[in-house]
Image (cartoon, helix red, strand yellow):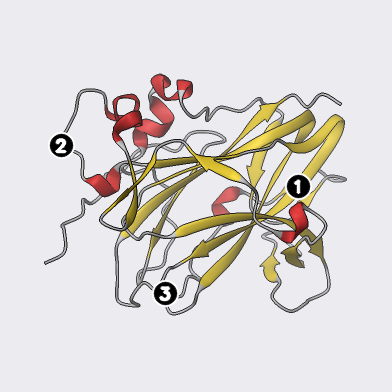
Amino acid sequence: MSEERSENQGGPVKKKIVPFAVTLGVLFLALVLPVLSWFATRKQLLAYAPVTSPEALYIGAGHRDIENGTFEDIRYLYFNGINAGEEYSDYVFCVYGTAISGFNIQLAFTTNNQFEYEIYRAVESTEPSSGAVRYVTHDDSPAVYYYSIDPLQNSGDPLDGDFLNATEVDGLTLADSSRHAAAYGDYTHVNRFAEALYWQTENPIAGNSTSDFVVYFILRVKTNGKASNDRETDVLCISAKSVTIVD
């Protein structure tokens, strides 16, 4: 019999911290912060994985129009396209801001499904191409954009990054106990799949220290052979943290 995995309880969404839930079978985007409510509310976490961003740094879904100041709200990052029968599913998001020389991307996620997450730099186009992510804007005159992995950035490979608290248990990649107190304090009755893994990019990504900018990314969710009838729920948080890049 498989180990029972805990269900999540609702909580508030915090500005510029992007929580969403992936549920195989149900396939919907939950704009609540269940088991990771502590991620946004416990200040102690900042010592381990900073999640706050300056007012000039934001995360959006697809297209960002710098000229007219419009953007696609992160709530449009839908996961209704995940297919457990496929090797992976791709989704587009962006980081945009003003007068930020650089930033790091950070992920925190629970491990019920044992998904793998990869982040690629992407390029935007109005012309379709093989393998590109199609995105339709949510305004009065919807436009269609396509996003492909940028072969000129990081050689087209995923962004390099490191886990802060990963360990192998019974062949599974899970969180160790090193960040437990920051998340849950003295509470010890936490399912092992509800301990979040923390990951962050190894090298800063360039923004623009003098003007507006937008950088596009593809988030690849690798399903690792999950059965199509699995309905475990995980929570994934994305954040962007400003850093100074010195030439």
Q: Quadrant of the C terminus?
A: top right
Left or right: 30 as drawn, with respect to 159: left
Q: Secondary structure at mark 1?
A: strand
- Label 1 neighbour load within 10 Å: few <14, some 14-19, many 20+: some
Residue 58 placed where, x, y %? 66, 37
Q: Is residue 142 visible?
A: no
Q: Secondary structure at mark 2?
A: loop
Mark 3: amino acid: Ala
Residue 60 placed where, x, y %? 65, 47
Residue at x 83%, y 36% (from the top left corner): 212
Residue 14 placed where, x, y %? 48, 34
Viewer-side residue, 152 vs 70: 152
Residue 202's mark? none
Residue at x 33%, y 44% (from the top left corner): 34
Query: What residue would you read off at disc 1?
Result: 215
Above or below for 23 versus 59: below
Query: What residue would you read off at disc 2?
Result: 189
- Label 2 neighbour load within 10 Å: few <14, some 14-19, many 20+: few
